[in-house]
Image: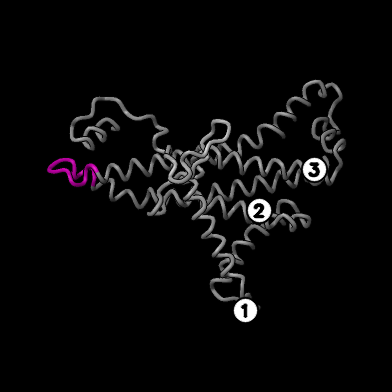
């Protein structure tokens, strides 16, 4: 299928060598192209620009929605309050009353991840920054530092790590194997799975959207046979975009919910 698309796109001159899959996500720097630190190029590329624009738009929405807050909210204010209420509900149901102070953090996670994911199907961008490993890794490490910091603050350094690595109430003989399992589970796999889950879903979704749009672009104008494939892709495309919109929201919710679960487990000992 990919070979047919490539051959059609290049007018039959395709020689059987495809660009690496990473070319879908690799963009040259637009600004500060020569800026390097320790051999790492820190130029501003398309992914960074999309991130800045989407997050600035969210900041503007929250500012406009709350700058003249009233007791009887307007529709715009009610929309912004709804976003906060969703995360307040997550905090209260998963963490408990102590979770109220984490509502700003959870709201930031949910909204930021949603809009960065949404860039995947936004017409001007069609590229989710979260399909680059740096963003999921940064978000997961932030959650990691928060829940470990909460555990140390609430329980004390020794008590937190002691009860995490040596859970009370289990047979002493299991302490031979439990510490490495708990260490791997709580301090390595948690942030790793948070990052990989978000990253993998966004990469897969981006590839699906690209294939759908390229199929329409290549086959729809092709007569007399190719247009049938293009027409089918065009008919299916709303379903693809609807499915991706569902995944966009679902991944934002899952990341936020799991962060709340990890914070809740750090607030209280076993």
Decide which of 46, 210 is in the foreground and name it: 46
Residue 178 appears left or right of 204:
right
Instruction: Give the residue at mark 3.
Output: 151
User: Which percent across, then down, holds residue 77?
Assistant: 58, 71
Q: CA distance from mark 2 to mark 3?
A: 17 Å
Question: Are there few (<14), some (14-19), or many (20+) residues within 10 Å of tag 2?
Answer: many
Asked which colour scheme the image uses, the reply is: one colour
Q: Is residue 160 magenta?
A: no
Q: Earlier in the sequence, mark 3 or mark 1?
A: 1
Crowd class of label 3 (few under 14; some 14 to 19; many from 20; radius 10 Å):
many
Give the magenta range.
218-230
Position of the N terminus, as image quadrant, is top left
Badge 2 or badge 1: first in the primary sequence: 1
> Which numbered dot is residue 72?
1
Give the total of numbered labels: 3
Residue 193 locus on image (x, y percent): 61, 36
Query: On the picture, is 153 further left or further right than 139?
Result: right
What residue is rendered at 54% in x and 55% in y? 55
């Amino acid at each position: 299928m990919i070979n047919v698309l490539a051959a059609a796109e290049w007018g039959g001159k395709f020689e059987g060598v495809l660009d690496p899959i990473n070319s879908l996500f690799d963009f040259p720097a637009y600004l500060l192209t020569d800026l390097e630190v320790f051999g790492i190029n820190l130029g501003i590329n398309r992914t960074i620009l999309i991130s800045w624009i989407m997050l600035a738009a969210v900041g503007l929405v929250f500012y406009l929605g709350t700058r003249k807050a009233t007791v009887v909210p307007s529709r715009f204010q009610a929309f912004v309050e709804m976003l906060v209420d969703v995360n307040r509900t997550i905090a209260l149901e998963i963490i408990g009353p102590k979770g109220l102070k984490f509502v700003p953090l959870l709201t930031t996670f949910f909204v930021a991840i949603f809009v960065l994911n949404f860039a995947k199907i936004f017409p001007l961008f069609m590229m989710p920054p979260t399909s680059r490993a740096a963003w999921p890794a940064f978000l997961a490490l932030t959650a990691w530092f928060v829940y470990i910091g909460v555990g140390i603050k609430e329980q004390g350094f020794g008590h937190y790590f002691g009860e995490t690595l040596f859970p009370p109430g289990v047979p002493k003989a299991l302490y031979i194997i439990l510490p490495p399992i708990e260490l791997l589970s709580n301090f390595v796999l948690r942030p790793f799975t948070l990052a990989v889950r978000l990253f993998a879903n966004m990469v897969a979704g981006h590839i699906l959207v690209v294939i759908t749009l390229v199929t329409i672009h290549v086959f729809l104008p092709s007569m007399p046979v190719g247009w049938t494939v293009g027409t089918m892709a065009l008919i299916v495309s709303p379903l693809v975009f609807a499915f991706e919109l569902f995944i966009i929201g679902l991944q934002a919710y899952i990341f936020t919910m799991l962060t709340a679960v990890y914070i809740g487990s750090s607030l209280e000992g076993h």
